[in-house]
Amino acid sequence: MSYVFDTKEFLFLGGSNERGCLAAFPSAKRKIQKIVFGNKSGLVQFITLKSGTPKILSKTQERKGVTALSLGGPPGSKDKLFVAHGNKIKAMTKKGKTFFAFEAPITDDIKALFVENPSIYTCCEFNINHFEAEGSKVTEKGFFNSQDVIHAMCPMPHLSENGAMGAIVVALGCEDRYIRIVDGTKMIAHPKIPGSVTALTLEAEINRDAETPVGGLVYGTDNGKVGQINVRKGGGIRPGWMYKGDGKKAAITALDAVDVLQDGVPDVVVAREDGSIEVLNITADGPSLKYSEQISSETITSVIHGNIVSMNTDLLASTYSGRLVSLTFKEEDKMASAGLNNDGDAAAGKEKRRTKNNQKGGDAKSSSSAASSAEALKLEADIQALQQEIKDMKTKFSSASSQTIAAQKQFNMNYSMKLDEENACYTLAIEIELPIEMVVLHSDVPLLLMETDTNQALLSQTEADRKEKSAVLATYTCVTRTTKLRIRLRTVEGQFGTISAYVIPKTSPKTSQRLQVPVKPLSLHAKVDYAEAKKLQEGAPVNTLDITGDFSLAQVHAWISIVLPGIPARLSSDRAELGYRSCFIDSTLTCLYCKGKVNTDANRRILHRKLK
């Protein structure tokens, strides 16, 4: 059986947005659900479908951009909206009326929210906090610090072993390839995952009344893998199914669990960084890919389900530049059985309908043609008037800017520098909310620029001037309208410096924004588990370097960060264990450090030379 989706652009709202800033209010009756969407400009918009056309019902505006958005309320109800603007939380009704506001005593922006009265859970870059609200009074109940960057949070309605934070167990997807299961202020499990965890969702509701409740937790990684683990009460972990992406390496940006194919079998909806949507059918034999489509060239930031454009279970996805795309399920075999699979009958029916329509429409043809021609002439005249108005405005601006310097507010920009371990190269992805005209790439370290199949840009390289500390100078000129550019490059290990990218959008006046990405000496080393790296070193010759002295943990952490990629900005423990594997040659490196002591074992001596 084959499946198709009717894919349409639901609405273009404009403005870049963070991940997870799209939600659908529940509907008490079988009605079209209201949608809420927040962007980086601080705008929150409430939307619904009326007479087949999306309508914006209301808006709210804050100076600080929307960093997180979630539906919440009493247990079992999600009829209230909670929005985070940095460290400030606002609660609103479906109509956009604010009834509660709270400024959390934290310095980082809130990246994810979960609210179940009276508890409020916030997730920042390295920590989660639990607050409890009683009326207008909010008190902090606890917090947990992660050892590495948190990319995703998924609350699990699990019976807690620790009463300090209520009955909610929280799963955290982290950069260091672990999912940390946290109960209160205590980590009760940390299963290892084959990639940095970028998205989490629950496969099924957890039964709170069961003696040993189990929750199916689905995760997505930065290297394109989707998998599942079963979490038991108390932190017991049982590995589940794994889907390796059918060869796709694009990072997972959002996940949703719903029976979207309407066959009684659970499905997992997968959204990727390359703009594709996949539907996985989960059976006892594991996951199978039932549907895949490239709905955009932009990063998909969120995907949700509900009665959005029909009374079926629709999908709605948001892209980085603020486009909302709807996907309505249609079963192709059912469409065929309606008369399309009988070629003879279909052809005869088609010819009969054509003859009938010709007879009915013959008289009205001339009048409708005349009306269409008049409408076309009017539209053409309107377009010409608008073009002339634009031309006049440009002329006026050119004369006014002859003695002044054009300036414009900086645009929002999103980027990632991801190591492709299989090909030993990096993919630098740059995305903005406006069409890109060109990107000028400058590097003070040697780079090998490689071809990228997905790019619609022309590359021109200029001979670099070594006297000016320039090793690479290249220009990527976009020949088609795009808001995203991918650049593949290979670095030279042992050399370190900075890559600068100057992004110029198609706007007037012309402005640019600079992006700087550091290149570490061991840039082609990928993070692996410390124990795994130690095991690979068994029986092989290694270079060992031990350093002792009167230095702090912060000092040695700064030294290691200069040399190795993927080091977190903060440490939440009094020691660190790091493992790396070279993507270019068969070598490994381990590093253990704490206050006053460093121990490294490596097959190569670049790290040792740098530390000395």
Image (cartoon, rainbow, N blue to C red):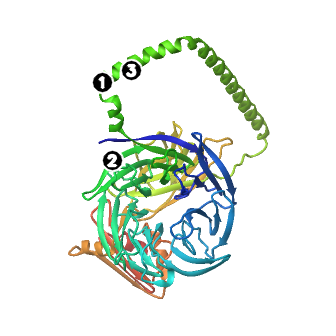
Q: Nearer the viewer, mark 3 or mark 2?
A: 3
Mark 1 nearby-residue class (10 Å; few <14, some 14–19, many ≥20): few
Image quarter of the N terminus: top left
> In the displayed structure, does residue 237 sit left or right of residue 411?
left
Quadrant of the image occupied by residue 170 = bottom left
Image quarter of the C terminus: bottom left
Mark 3 nearby-residue class (10 Å; few <14, some 14–19, many ≥20): few
**Secondary structure type for disc 3:** helix
Residue 122 vertical position relative to residue 523 in the rendered view, above or below: below
Residue where numbered disc 1 is placed: 343
- Measured from the top left, where is residue 282 in percent x and y? 31, 56
Quadrant of the image occupied by residue 96 = bottom right
What amino acid is at disc 3? Lys
Residue 209 vertical position relative to residue 56 in the rendered view, above or below: below
Q: CA distance from mark 3 to mark 2?
A: 31 Å
Residue 532 vertical position relative to residue 599 in the rendered view, above or below: above
User: Which label number is shown at residue 350?
Assistant: 3
